[in-house]
Image: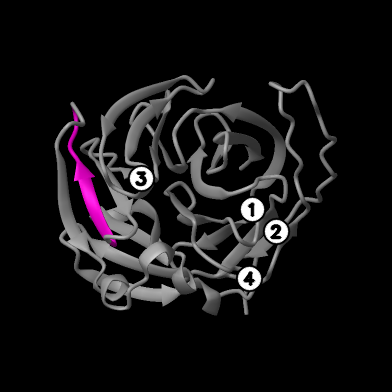
Amino acid sequence: MPLLLLAGACACEDPLANRGIAKPEQKEKTEKSSGGKPRKVPEMGACQVIKARVEELSGLCMTKDSTALWAVGDEGAICKVSFSGVVTPVLKTRLDAEGITLNPATGDLYIAVEGDQMVCRLKAPDYQTLDTLFYIKEAVEEDFDNNGLEGISFYKDSLLFVGSQEDALLWTCKLDGTIVSRRSLMDETSLIEEIAGLCYDPVKNWLWVTDSDACKLFLFSAETFDLLASYDIPSIENAESICVDRTHGYVWVGSDEDSPKIYRFSFKF
């Protein structure tokens, strides 16, 4: 059984409201590598809150040059968001867009759509051509409806991780929709309640997951799916997306609330 590592709750400072809450102390955490030696996992640091006017903000990922964020919302907006929260609309659709990820080789964007339970591709470089790639058959046939696809992340070897709220299910898919593997992250930890957002970290071969019901971020091995760490985020109302930004030392978390916000956590990787 993997070693479970829990970080203390992190309260966020909102510079727009000129209000700060002291961050609780956190101890350095380690987990066991396959050889039994301790291996360090990331430490959560300070947090800032940024307002971002993306209606029902549900998905985030880094741009190819790591200078901004791509964002999608439940009402179909696809936008680019600066690190200060300036929103540039790119495309308006009628899709219940819940997750977004980028192909680092081509710059194409892949979008997880709830309701229809499908994955779409938005082609680079103009990001105006939207194609339906495939449906997650199980989510369609079992009528997951509004508990369906929520997270998506590009994985190595041109694979996609696709996750759902229902049973915290995680599929690994080829770009043509062929399912390579399927599992429930509930089998890995009793702490998780749903998958609300996904982000693959290729530097360490980690999979980051946000869970809006449990108010936690989870860190899993992308190979074995062992739970490596979890982080409490009780101050975030509806954490529906997560994006790892190693270039600047941050983890970005998007919250779908009345006034959508992006939470920028400093992390010591």
Of mark 1 and mark 3, the one earlier in the sequence is 1
Tags 3 and 2 in contact by the CB under 8 Å rule? no
Q: Which residue is mark 2?
A: 30
Q: Amino acid at mark 4?
A: Gly
Q: CA distance from mark 1 to mark 3?
A: 25 Å
Circle 1/circle 3 CB separation < 8 Å: no
For the magenta stretch, what is the residue range? 117-125
Q: Is 24 displayed left or right of 242 in the figure?
A: right
SS class of the residue under badge 1? loop
Q: Which residue is mark 4?
A: 36
The answer for how far apart the CA atoms under marks 3 and 4 are is 35 Å
Indicate which disc, 2 or 4, sits on the residue closer to the N terminus: 2
CA gap between label 1 and label 2 equals: 6 Å
| Cα gap from disc 1 to disc 4, whole angstroms | 15 Å
Q: Residue at x 46, y 41 (%)?
A: 56
Which residue is found at the position 58% from the left and 68% from the top? Answer: 193
Q: In the picture, which quadrant includes the C terminus?
A: top right
Between disc 3 and disc 2, the foreground one is: 3
Identify whether 47 is placed above or below 19: below
Question: Which residue carries the number 1 mark?
Answer: 41
The label shown at residue 100 is: 3
Circle nearer the N terminus (1, 2): 2
Q: Position of residue 217 (x, y in %)?
A: 61, 54
Q: State yes or no: discs 1 and 2 in contact (Cβ < 8 Å).
A: yes
Residues packed near mark 3 inside 10 Å, few (<14), some (14 to 19) or many (20 plus): many
On screen, residue 94 versus residue 264, left or right, reads: left
Place of residue 135 in the rendered image (x, y in percent of width and height, measured from the top left): 22, 64
For discs 1 and 3, the disc positioned in front in the rendered view = 3
Q: Residue at x 54, y 75 (%)?
A: 186
